[in-house]
Amino acid sequence: MSIKPITPLMPVYPRCDVRPVRGEGCYLIGERGERYLDFASGIAVNLLGHGHPKLVKAIADQAATLMHVSNLYGMPLGEKFAQKLVDSTFADTVFFTNSGAEAVECAIKTARRYHYANGQAHRHKIISFDNAFHGRTLGTISATSQPKMRDGFEPLLPGFTVVPFNDLDVSLAQIDDSTAGFLLETVQGVGGVCPATAEFLTGLRKACDEHGLLLILDEVQCGYARTGTFFAHEQYGITPDIMAVAKGIGAGFPLGACLATAEAAKGMVFGTHGTTYGGNPLAMAAGLAVLDEVLADGFLDHVQAIGARLRAALEQLIPNHDGLFEEVRGMGLMLGLKLKDSVEARAFVAHLRDNHGLLTVAAGQNVVRILPPLVIDESHIAECIEKLSAGARSHAEAQVA
């Protein structure tokens, strides 16, 4: 058997032929000059689009001033950014990371350390959920049940029990003397754009309060205005004890955060956690610029209104292509278009990309994720619907041929 030579970039991604070299607003431009309507946003990252002038200026100015110092020193920008997040959320304290997986790792450590600090180190088990995605570190893949992420990496981190998502009775039945809390995405992204039901999420919150457990939310993909509120859990009338955030928080700059209440973070004292790059001045300048935009008057109202408009347009598309599209799901500008079983989502995403210049992302349950920049307007929706409709027609014609 011949072995293909390895590439300089480790071949862990099935990279397509789109090779972006520039971004302009809601568009990506490839190295041949071709333009793509970017309704993937780097998988829910570029919430301000590409090349946003305020973000670009903040990064450039800070890069010329100070990019990195050790966390052994005081961090004026980090303190300012953390305070703004505390003022705008349930949290009392923030740990800055470089990615979503790191933020989830910090959340897991915070939860376990909480019970340790309470003299209950045996309470270490975290209940997580089917079809979840929390990252690809050894700890975060241990919290999932997906073989494609786990196979070949055993033995995994012990202390996780995975149960069906949105099944409150089964979830509550798993609580025992070793349980530390629940870990879940408020809206599952990779799993198929599946929001938690109100009964499920409020039931978990109630159980945590009754049993002294911690509710840990992973809002890496669904948070930071993506669903039309600053964080998705706000639409359920509950608050978590710990929350992992990333993606949109830096709008393209590598940045994440673990937010927690003072009670939940009581065990996170000197020496319990750390990071070399997390909270560096360059990242903090980027994060502050993004947060100023997200919290500006009218921004969240725009996401809600334009999200409702996009959803309505997608729903109106279904009857014209009912052999292909089944339903629209999701919240705000985190939407999923579920396809019929006769069509494979990854293949349709590739068809839209290669033949119609529309970038989307495949997800579980045969869903096409639609995750545009949060700054889109009516013209971008019209262009998206035109490309989707044309793509549906040409895909159907290709199947007949």
Image: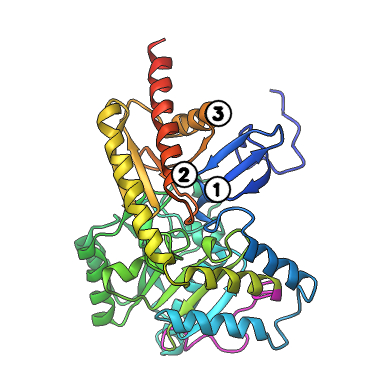
SS class, disc 2? helix
Side of 200 where 160 appears, left or right: right
Along the line of sight, the residue nearer the viewer: 188 or 330? 330
Dot 2 amino acid type: His
Nearer the camera: disc 1 or disc 3: 1
Magenta segment: does it hold 268? yes
Residue located beneath label 2 in the image: 380
225 vs 279: above or below = above
Q: Position of residue 177 (x, y in %)?
A: 30, 77
The span from disc 2 to disc 1 (Cα, nearest Å) is 8 Å
The stretch in magenta equals 263-281
Dot 2 and dot 1 residues touching (CB under 8 Å): yes
Dot 3 amino acid type: Asp
How is the structure coloured here? rainbow
What residue is at 43 percent from the left and 48 percent from the top? 146
Number of disc labels: 3
What residue is at 47 percent from the left and 83 percent from the top? 86
Q: What secondary structure prevails in the magenta region?
A: loop
Residue located beneath label 1 in the image: 26
Q: Quadrant of the N terminus?
A: top right
14 vs 302: above or below = above
Q: Quadrant of the C terminus?
A: top left
Magenta segment: does it hold 55? no
Residue located beneath label 3 in the image: 354
